[in-house]
Amino acid sequence: MSYGQQGGPQSQWDPWKPHSQQPWNGGGADQTPDWAALAEASESRNKRRRMLFIGGGAFATIAVGTAVAVAVVSANDNGSSNQPTSGLSGAGNLPGSTTQPPSFASTSAPPPLDPKDFVSDKSKDTAPLGAQILFPGTQYTVGETVYKKGPTDDTKSCSAAAKGGLPKILTDNDCTRLLRVSYVRGGIAVTVGVAVFDTEAQATKAAKKVDPQKDFLRSLSGQGVKGFCNSTVCLMSANSYGRYAYFTITGFTSGKDVTDKDTEVYKTSNNLNSLTYEQIRRRGETQASAAANE
């Protein structure tokens, strides 16, 4: 729509165009605004503004929708995937990143101490030692069988507590001490002798050298134990554990010779051999436990 002024050229006023003329009637003091033109211009302006607002709103909606979509996709990628961090895109480009797993110092516990080590060498075997310490109490019980404990003896002259070829064997291997104890049950008595050496090698060699037919431990009597095995046939045994060689001599207090049919004599010898082994082994366990707790 065009607007004109009286007495002048016609022109169109655009409120959004710089320097455009307002639609006033030309001429004199009685000039009044063209209200119809103003109303039409205002309507045109409002339409353009609404279009801008609507267009901007649509753009904003699209932008927000895109942002939400990106956020949802990202959340799904991070939350629903079970891949490890090293498998994510771009992880290898991070400064200082590495594909090698971290290493840690070993935390394995040291091996337990061997009890035998503590009774195999003089420098480690330092616990108090004596016949009463190694064989405490007044009796030894195996099941329903009870052996009454008799006298004990402790000497540094190993050869004095032996006879036959045993004194020489003990001396040649540097025996430093010989402990003895006797037990009795019924008419059967047994003396246990524990020879002490500085090393396991010496004790092992001494025990292996013993000939049961001619190398004997001297029996120990008294305190309820009658004399035995002084001039009769008796059962002799020799073993070793650690730096200790241990021997038993078993026979009848009646002076009767032992034969291979006397099963109770063999049983008594076996039981006291087991007791001696267990006492020496327990000595090693006690010292190993004490060393582990230091």
Image (cartoon, helix red, strand yellow):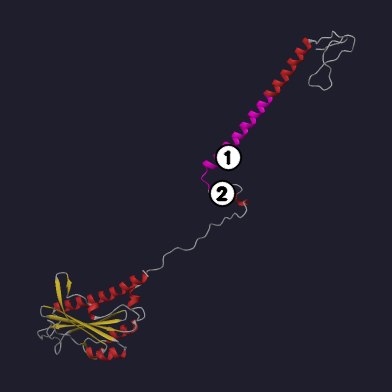
Crowding near the residue tagged with mark 2, few <14, some 14–19, many ≥20 C-alpha atoms within 10 Å: few
Q: Amino acid at mark 1?
A: Ser
- Residue 270: x and y in percent read 20, 77
Alpha-carbon distance for marks 1 and 2?
15 Å
- Residue 183: x and y in percent read 16, 79
Task: Check the image and name the residue furthest to the top.
Answer: 30
Residue at the location (72% across, 18% down)?
46
1 or 2: mark nearer the eye: 1
Q: Which residues are magenta?
A: 54-83
- Residue 154: x and y in percent read 23, 85
Q: Which quarter of the picture shows residue 184?
A: bottom left
- Residue 224: x and y in percent read 12, 81
Q: Quadrant of the C terminus?
A: bottom left
Residue 147 in view of the camera: yes
Q: Which quarter of the picture shows residue 55?
A: top right
Q: Which mark is residue 148?
A: none
Q: Secondary structure at mark 2?
A: helix
Main SS, magenta residues: helix
Q: Amino acid at mark 2?
A: Gly
Q: Quadrant of the N terminus?
A: top right
Crowding near the residue tagged with mark 1, few <14, some 14–19, many ≥20 C-alpha atoms within 10 Å: few
Q: Is residue 64 highlighted in magenta?
A: yes
Residue at the location (77% across, 13% down)?
38
Asked whether disc 1 touches disc 2, contact meaning CB atoms under 8 Å apart, the reply is no
In the depicted structure, whether residue 103 falls above or below residue 17: below
Does 75 sit left or right of 269 as displayed? right
Of the two numbered discs 1 and 2 on the same chain, state the one appearing first in sequence. 1
Taking depth in this image into account, of 142 and 287 the one nearest to the observer is 287
Taking depth in this image into account, of 157 and 242 the one nearest to the observer is 157
Say which residue label 2 marks. 87
Q: Which mark is residue 74?
A: 1
